[in-house]
Image (cartoon, helix red, strand yellow):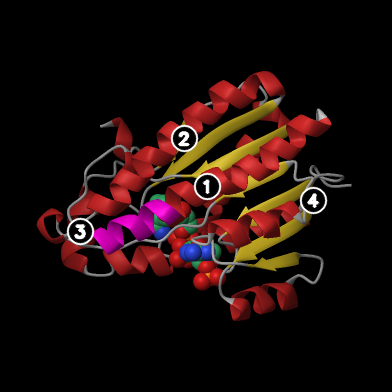
Amino acid sequence: MGKFSGRRALVTGAGSGIGRATALKLAQMGAEVFALSKTAENLESLCAECPNIKTVCVDLSDWTSTREAVQKIVPIHLLVNNAAAAALEPFLTTSPETFDRLMNVNVKAMMNVSQVVAGDLVNREGRGSIVNVSSQAGQRPLLDHTAYSCSKAAVDMMTKMMALELGPKGIRVNAVSPTVVMTAMGRLGWSDPAKAGPMLARIPQGRFAEVDEVVNAIMYLLGDESDMVNGHMLPVDGGFLAV
Ligand code: NDP
């Protein structure tokens, strides 16, 4: 019997990076796991790695298809809204397409998936825990991150709104706010030592986060041991946001 035995979990953006590791950890801890992502090959390789995991292939930027796909797999007791897109553009040349795309995938889709999952739980009078994956970028401006940082600031407020309105209905909602993690997304922004160096200098622990360190924080917030924690953004940042 694992810690999450008997619970059904949904992880978005589970094809790679933090989401994939989260799905695998939840399966290891006994949950029945649904892994949602947009690239079929990534989901196939996840299934090959852990055949117990069920997959949902959908593009979160499509509101209707996403809603239909999630409706098919409820009830979900543990939801990790992890999927996100990133883009690097200076403020003056951030395009409306980039801004819309990031707000759509990073924020609007989070609301969409959460409405279906939480709405169903409320109807069943079930209890649940939701973790939104935000970023340190939601609380600090980072060069060339206008669309991304704005989307993560919106994720933080969405987390608080959800905690406020869903808390009384038995559903807790928290977020994690990691510093850089060297996934595909992390490499996009921080592979260049000229960028990584100054960022590392702002992190008191002097290093980036490991995927498993973010996953551990997600597990804590999902689990019953954090039952009194609600509407909180937990930094996994080596102290970046503290100084
Ligand atoms: P990855 O790029 O490795 O993974 C992102 C995942 O999101 C992929 O599996 C991708 O799907 C999925 N995804 C993206 N767009 C869509 C979409 N339209 N529909 C469905 N799925 C989609 O990134 P990380 O693991 O690094 O990022 C995970 C989370 O952590 C994100 O919320 C990110 O903002 C956050 N974060 C990351 C940091 C970092 O430095 N890496 C730092 C702070 C926060 P697929 O594989 O199917 O294509």
Report whether residue 7 is seen: yes
Q: Which residues are magenta?
A: 96-104
The answer to whether the residue labelled 2 contacts the one labelled 1, judged by CB atoms less than 8 Å apart, is yes
Vertical arrangement, residue 189 with respect to residue 49, above or below: above
Regarding mark 2 in the picture, which secondary structure is present there?
helix
Given residues 116 and 56, the one toward you in this image is 116
Label 4 amino acid? Ala
Residue extending farthest to the bottom is 41
Q: Position of residue 61 (x, y in %)?
A: 49, 61
Within the magenta stretch, is there residue 174? Answer: no
Tell me what residue is drawn at x 75 percent, y 57 percent: 33
Q: Position of residue 170 (x, y in %)?
A: 71, 24
- Reading the image, the residue beneath label 1 is 110
Q: Nearer the viewer, mark 3 or mark 2?
A: 2
The answer to whether the residue labelled 3 contacts the one labelled 4, judged by CB atoms less than 8 Å apart, is no
- Reading the image, the residue beneath label 2 is 158
Q: Position of residue 47 (x, y in %)?
A: 73, 73
Q: CA distance from mark 2 to mark 1?
A: 9 Å
- Reading the image, the residue beneath label 4 is 31
Vertical arrangement, residue 40 with respect to residue 101, above or below: below
Return the disc, 1 or 4, that comes first in the chain's sequence. Answer: 4
Regarding mark 1 in the picture, which secondary structure is present there?
helix
Q: CA distance from mark 3 to mark 4?
A: 39 Å
Label 1 amino acid? Met
Q: Main secondary structure of the magenta part?
A: helix
Q: CA distance from mark 3 to mark 2?
A: 32 Å
- Reading the image, the residue beneath label 3 is 197
